[in-house]
Image: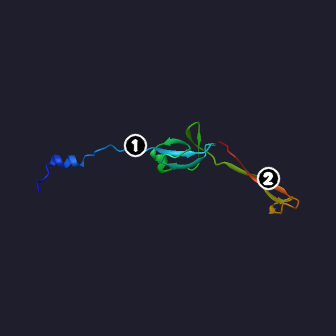
Amino acid sequence: MSEMTPEEFWAALAPTTSLPVPIYRLYYDDQGLPLFYSMQEDPGNYIEIDHETYANPPTHVRVVDGKLKVLTMNPIAKLMPGDYGTPCAVNDVCIVVNHASPHTKWSLKKHDPN
């Protein structure tokens, strides 16, 4: 068996092809709310993000005009009476009642202050 020359050794270690540059994506719904982060090409709306954002995804974000927007405040949720929701006693929202009993329907409404 013949010995390998230093040039042959280094040539064997040299990369033969270049690796594709990874693309980091944030998929989002029609309202701009994040669905999932991925490096795969999946169907749906997405924006490209950098590696740091992909590795440490922020929790309160929204996609606005094709850009990632970090929300400064959490959405505010408030219990409101309405035409749909959980039926509660007329004088006490803490008591859930049957639909057949006199009641007021309550549901959680969210307001985004951003």
Q: Quadrant of the N terminus?
A: bottom left
Q: Which mark is residue 86?
A: none
Q: Pointer 1: what residue?
A: 21
| Placement of 47 over or under 86, stated as above or below | above
Circle 2: residue type: Tyr
SS state under label 1:
loop
Taking the spot 31% from the left edge, 44% from the top edge, the residue there is 17
Name the foreground residue: 12 vs 69.
12
Circle 1: residue type: Val
> Residue 34, how many percent across, how many down?
58, 47
Taking the spot 12% from the left edge, 53% from the top edge, the residue there is 3
> Residue 59, how many percent across, how many down?
57, 50
Farthest residue, direction left: 2
Taking the spot 81% from the left edge, 63% from the top edge, the residue there is 95
How far apart are the alpha carbons under marks 2 and 1? 50 Å
> Residue 54, how many percent across, how many down?
48, 48
| Placement of 103 over or under 61, stated as above or below | below
Taking the spot 61% from the left edge, 43% from the top edge, the residue there is 32
| Placement of 71 over or under 100, stated as above or below | above
Name the foreground residue: 68 vs 1.
1
- Left or right, residue 108 beside residue 50: right
Q: Residues within 10 Å of mark 1 (few under 14, many from 20)?
A: few
- Left or right, residue 91 beside residue 75: right
Q: Residues within 10 Å of mark 2 (few under 14, many from 20)?
A: few
Q: Pointer 2: what residue?
A: 84
- Left or right, residue 110 beside residue 105: left
> Residue 98, how many percent across, how many down?
83, 63
